[in-house]
Image (tube, rainbow, N blue to C red):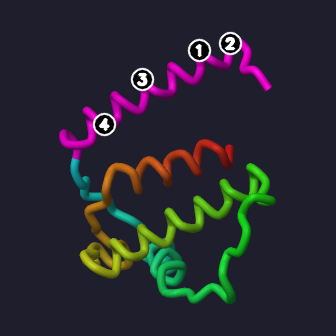
Amino acid sequence: MEESAQYARYRRDGAVLAEIGRRLEPQVSRLPVRIPGDLAAAAVAAWERDEPGDLGDLRGETHEQRGVRDQAGALALIGLAITERGTAVDGDAVLVELDVTEIAAALTAALEAR
């Protein structure tokens, strides 16, 4: 199936966006963020959870299912960061340095949940 001119332009735009990302990656690092204790505990639990079985063949996975799985994975990686370098502060909050990709995943999930 031949791609329309519109989607060919979108594909080229995506390649430019990826190149911008490659150039930005060495310029960005971790940022300190404060996460409420209950949410930090949920992220750590996601990291520590053992999923039964394997994922199997993902070719039949819908776009929505892949997005949900990606969000769960992002949460687990935040849980790993909290486990490795999180510090309890101000009562029940946790201070942790997150990679910008982890922050972006959380912000994207918040925007998509609106």
- Residue furthest to the front: 1
Look at mark 4 in the image and give the residue it sits on: 22
Q: Is residue 64 left or right of residue 49?
A: right
Callout 1–callout 3 Cβ contact below 8 Å: no
Q: Main secondary structure of the magenta part?
A: helix
Q: Which mark is residue 9?
A: 1
Relative image position of residue 76 (x, y in whole percent):
49, 72
Reading the image, the residue beneath label 2 is 6
Marks 1 and 2 in Cβ contact (< 8 Å): yes
Task: Tell me which corner region of the image, top left, top right, bottom left or bottom right, holds residue 8.
Answer: top right
- As helix, strand or loop, the secondary structure at mark 3 comes to helix
Distance from label 4 to label 3 (Cα)? 10 Å
Q: Amino acid at mark 1?
A: Arg
Gap between marks 3 and 2 measured at Cα: 15 Å
Which corner quadrant of the image does residue 98 belong to?
A: bottom left
- Give the distance between the C-alpha atoms of the residues marked 2 and 4, in whole angstroms: 25 Å
Disc 1 element: helix
Outermost residue on the top side: it is: 5
- Read off the magenta span: 1-28
Report if residue 39 lies within the magenta region. Answer: no
Q: Of label 4 and label 3, which has the lower sequence position?
A: 3
| Residue at x-position 54% and y-position 79% | 46
- Relative vertical location of residue 2 with respect to residue 106 in this rendering, above or below: above
* Residue placed most toward the observer, 71 or 43: 71
Q: In which quadrant is the C terminus drawn?
A: top right
Q: Residue at x 26, y 42 (%)?
A: 25
Distance between the alpha carbons at the discs numbered 1 and 2: 5 Å
Q: CA distance from mark 1 to mark 4?
A: 20 Å
